[in-house]
Amino acid sequence: MVPPLAVNKKTATMSASIVMSLSGMALMIAVFPLFPAFEDFFVNSIWYGLNNPLFVGLPNKTRHYNIFEQYYGRMRSNRDVSLRWSVVLKLTKGMFSQDYADLAFRKVGFYGNDGVCLFKYFVDEEDSQQNFVWAILLVNFSCFVTITFAT
């Protein structure tokens, strides 16, 4: 098998930079959902443990909004626009300040729905990661087609 280009320092450097760039992009795609700055986009729900009778299971933003509306009264704006996860936690802690001194919670994010941290291929219309998943699937498909027909 003959290499397509002459192997010299320039082509070796170019190949190494392409491999490093692709590795860096793959790493960013993998850890991007874990950054706290993007929690409104990648967190699906919050788990409050087994001792909390009000938030049972894994309530999402819509379920939180409905509970807040009942507890606090009429909410000021649209639930989809203004309800950030930081606001959800602040409102939730305000509800349980006397009864639960230490409100334990765990954010269930993009990788948190599976025990082995699998990529979430199947999303529904309520998931905020829908566009991210489709972009990753498109990249995977284009890589598959490139590898298949690169002969």
Image (tube, grey):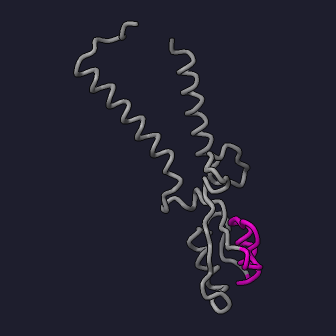
The residue at 42%/34% (across/down) is 22
Quadrant location of the N terminus in the rendered image: top left
User: Is 10 situated above or below 22?
Assistant: above
Image x and y of residue 17, in percent: 32, 31
Position of residue 31 relative to residue 64, above or below, is above
Tell me if residue 8 comes above or below residue 87 in the rendering: above
Q: Position of residue 11 (x, y in %)?
A: 28, 20
Task: Please determine whether, in this image, residue 131 is positioned above or below residue 90.
Answer: above
State the residue lying farthest toward the front. Answer: 116
User: Is residue 76 inside the magenta stretch?
Assistant: no
In the shown orientation, is residue 150 left or right of residue 61?
A: left
Give the residue at the far bottom of this rendering.
98
**Figure disc tally:** 0
**59 vs 53, nearest the viewer:** 53
**x and y percentages locating residue 84 in the rendered image:** 59, 68
Residue 83: name its quadrant: bottom right
Q: Where's residue 92, x and y in %?
A: 64, 79
The residue under the point 70% across, 65% down is: 60
- In this picture, which residue range is highlighted in magenta? 50-73
Is residue 88 toward the left or the right of residue 27 in the image?
right
In-image side of 10 versus 94 (left or right): left
Instruction: State the image quarter where residue 61 is shown.
Output: bottom right
Which residue is situated farthest in the left direction here? 9
Q: Which residue is at the front of the view, 76 or 19?
A: 19
What residue sits 28% from the left and 11% below the top?
Answer: 6
Q: Who's the residue at 62% across and 73% down the image? A: 105
